[in-house]
């Protein structure tokens, strides 16, 4: 399936189709990175799972609260490490997708270097994104929903286009403004696909987990962790380049529209 970047504004269906083609074209150079990311996710999730298990049997709410308080530093440390590693690896995946979009081969080493270099900018931009959306939600629901979509592409602009932290958020807002409903429609399709995949994994996991009784719950959880969470991790990681591909193609389409190509196409039609 040969991928070619859009050269003029396209319909929603064409954007989604091109996004899928970019995803398929990126799979080969990204496969090792996806496998590494999935493996690290499973290890970190298992470490977090073990950290959350009570050290001893508790009989009162006070004992449970005391144990949770003791676990908190370890849980926070593991969560922070997971977040940092995830940002680096997901940046690297996005870098490969963006490089293939631009006609490159998606070199793994270069992508990892980009992932490390862009870790802090993406981290800060993600915090600013969360704050902006949260404030919008608190003031009125609609501003929060608008900002949730208009600021969404900051990571693409930081990793692929080498934009700065504030510049990426402003550029994302500028690109989407005037194309809000179009962008929402483009996002909803892959989100529904992702939701369906997660539901399938959850249902399968529920079927496997339904065989145990309450007395053997702890043992069942530990025995079934590997199988279920490996599947979940692989599905989750494969979802990332798929969403990245759609976002990269859509950002390219928005750039064409903002550059005047949309007007030229309409006049030609």
Image: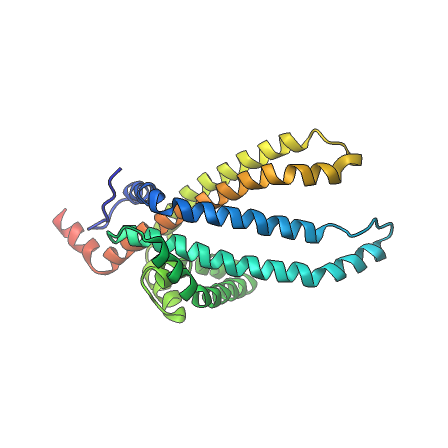
Residue 232 in sight here: yes
**35 or 231, nearer to the observer:** 35
**154 or 223, nearer to the observer:** 223
Please state the horizontal and vertical placement of residue 213, each as a whole percent of the image. Answer: 76, 32
Image point 84% across, 56% down: which residue? 63
Residue 110 lies in quadrant: bottom left
**190 or 134, nearer to the observer:** 190
Q: Relative to residue 56, is residue 1 depicted above or below?
A: above
Please state the horizontal and vertical placement of residue 178, each as a whole percent of the image. Answer: 32, 58
Please state the horizontal and vertical placement of residue 22, each as a whole percent of the image. Answer: 31, 45
Image point 62% across, 48% down: which residue? 46
**33 or 216, nearer to the observer:** 33
Q: Is residue 188 left or right of 55 when viewed as pictured? A: left
Please state the horizontal and vertical placement of residue 23, each as a whole percent of the image. Answer: 34, 44
Residue 253 in sight here: no
Q: Relative to residue 203, is residue 143 depicted above or below?
A: below
Q: Quadrant of the N terminus?
A: top left
């Amino acid at each position: 399936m040969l991928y070619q970047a859009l050269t003029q504004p396209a319909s929603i269906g064409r954007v989604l189709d091109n996004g899928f083609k970019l995803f398929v074209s990126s799979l080969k150079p990204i496969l090792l990175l996806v496998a590494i990311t999935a493996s690290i996710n499973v290890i970190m999730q298992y470490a977090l799972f073990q950290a959350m298990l009570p050290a001893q049997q508790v009989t009162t709410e006070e004992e449970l609260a005391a144990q949770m308080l003791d676990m908190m530093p370890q849980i926070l440390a593991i969560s922070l490490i997971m977040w940092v590693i995830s940002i680096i690896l997901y940046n690297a995946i996005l870098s490969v997708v963006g490089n293939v979009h631009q006609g490159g081969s998606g070199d793994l080493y270069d992508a990892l270097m980009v992932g490390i270099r862009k870790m802090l900018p993406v981290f800060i931009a993600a915090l600013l994104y969360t704050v902006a959306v949260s404030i919008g939600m608190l003031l009125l629901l609609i501003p929060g929903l608008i900002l949730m979509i208009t600021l969404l592409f900051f990571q693409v602009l930081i990793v692929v286009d080498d934009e700065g932290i504030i510049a990426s958020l402003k550029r994302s807002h500028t690109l989407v403004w005037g194309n809000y409903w179009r962008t929402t429609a483009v996002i909803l399709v892959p989100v529904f696909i992702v939701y369906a995949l997660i539901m399938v994994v959850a249902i399968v996991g529920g079927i496997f987990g339904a065989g145990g009784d309450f007395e053997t719950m702890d043992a069942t959880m530990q025995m079934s962790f590997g199988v279920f969470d490996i599947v979940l991790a692989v599905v989750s990681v494969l979802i990332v380049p798929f969403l990245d591909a759609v976002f990269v193609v859509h950002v390219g389409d928005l750039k064409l529209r903002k550059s005047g190509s949309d007007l030229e196409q309409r006049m030609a039609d």
